[in-house]
Image (cartoon, helix red, strand yellow):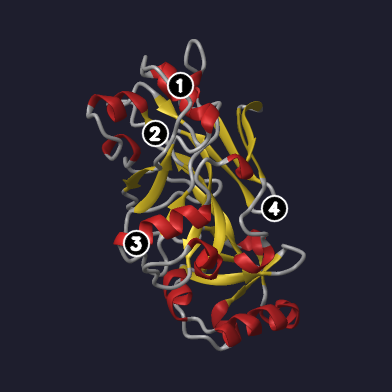
Amino acid sequence: MKLLTFRYQNQRMPGVLSEDMTRVIPVSAFGLPYPDMLSLIRSVTPEEMEGLRSRRAELAEKEGIGLALTEKCAPIPCPDQDVICLGINYMAHAEESARFKHEEFNGERPYAVYFSKRVSEAVADGGLIDSHSDIVDSLDYEAELAFIISRDARNVPAEKAAEYVFGYTVLNDVSARTIQNRHKQWYFGKSLDGFTPMGPWIVTADEVEFPPAREISCLVNGELRQHSNTAQMIFGIPHIISELSRGMTLRAGTIISTGTPSGAGMGFQPPKYLKPGDQVVCQVEGIGTITNEVR
């Protein structure tokens, strides 16, 4: 099932996409009191989720709104905590990152790299990536699979991690490389306004194998830049949830982005950075596609 956030008649609300993907049914049409996606994730019961699945065909006819008549929003437009991200979580990307920083790489990655990304408002599919050209000269893209925590998680064993995944979405971890490296940490260079395109929806966890093994790709102006499979992640979702929850509570609604494969702009010689007018398409097989233009 695909859940999305959309705007219709000046109201932003969560909805369920019809099976033919042409109509969206507001969650309120199911008699549920959730005004936004975060409140739905945190409070929806298994019985209510089953009602969304079983009644969507019926309500698509009666209450559905043509998807073309709505304005797309990111599925969680305004996260109330920073997005947790994995750095260099595909081996080939670890190699190109080391080359970019003129560091030696011995092929060993014993520990995951975590960082956070501030998101004032996530950019929807079809939205614009702000180039911030007054301060950024090295704008880069990173196609990633992201997942959303379904309920508060603490001390979760790896074998139970699937029980804490609400669903999956596509995220572009837009990065300003010069700023990222100048400050010797990644927070500022990855957190500028407009640097988190996400969507187009959340695919619920029951529709995706665990852990996911899906093709992931990024095209810039039609040129394939990134292509891999999420099965190639160094640290998979069971490890991520288990390790992080040992020392911190992962609240329901937390977004975790799992890292990007090789082919980022910084990995080319010379680098292929984004510029205004470029079109960036990030896709994860069976999850969705987001298309954004740089302004």
| Label 4: element kind | loop
Q: Earlier in the sequence, mark 4 or mark 2?
A: 2
Q: Vertical placement of 274 versus 286: above or below?
A: above
| Label 1: element kind | helix
Q: Nearer the viewer, mark 1 or mark 3?
A: 3
Give me the disc on residue 286. 4
| Mark 1 and mark 2 residues within 8 Å of each other at the beta carbon | no
| Mark 4 and mark 1 residues within 8 Å of each other at the beta carbon | no
Give me the disc on residue 175. 2
Q: How many marks?
A: 4
Q: Earlier in the sequence, mark 3 or mark 4?
A: 3
User: What amino acid type is highlighted by mark number 3?
Assistant: Arg
Q: Which residue is mark 1?
A: 266
Estimate how packed mark 1 is, as few (under 14), some (14 to 19) or many (20 or more) residues with alpha carbons within 10 Å: many
The quarter of the picture where the N terminus appears is bottom right
Residue nearer the viewer, 175 or 102: 102
Identify the image quadrant of residue 53.
bottom right
In the displayed orientation, state which residue is furthest to the left. Answer: 183
Q: Earlier in the sequence, mark 2 or mark 3?
A: 2
Measured in 3D between alpha carbons, the distance from the residue under mark 4 to the one under mark 2, in whole angstroms, is 25 Å
Measured in 3D between alpha carbons, the distance from the residue under mark 3 to the one under mark 4, in whole angstroms, is 31 Å
User: At x 36% / y 64%, what residue is drawn?
Assistant: 250
Q: Which residue is mark 3?
A: 246
User: What amino acid type is highlighted by mark number 4?
Assistant: Gly
Q: Vertical placement of 294 versus 118: above or below?
A: above
Q: Nearer the viewer, mark 2 or mark 3?
A: 3
Q: Vertical placement of 270 versus 276: above or below?
A: above
| Mark 2 and mark 3 residues within 8 Å of each other at the beta carbon | no
Residue nearer the viewer, 256 or 177: 256
Residue 108: x %, y % from top left: 45, 30
User: What amino acid type is highlighted by mark number 2?
Assistant: Ser
User: What amino acid type is highlighted by mark number 1?
Assistant: Met
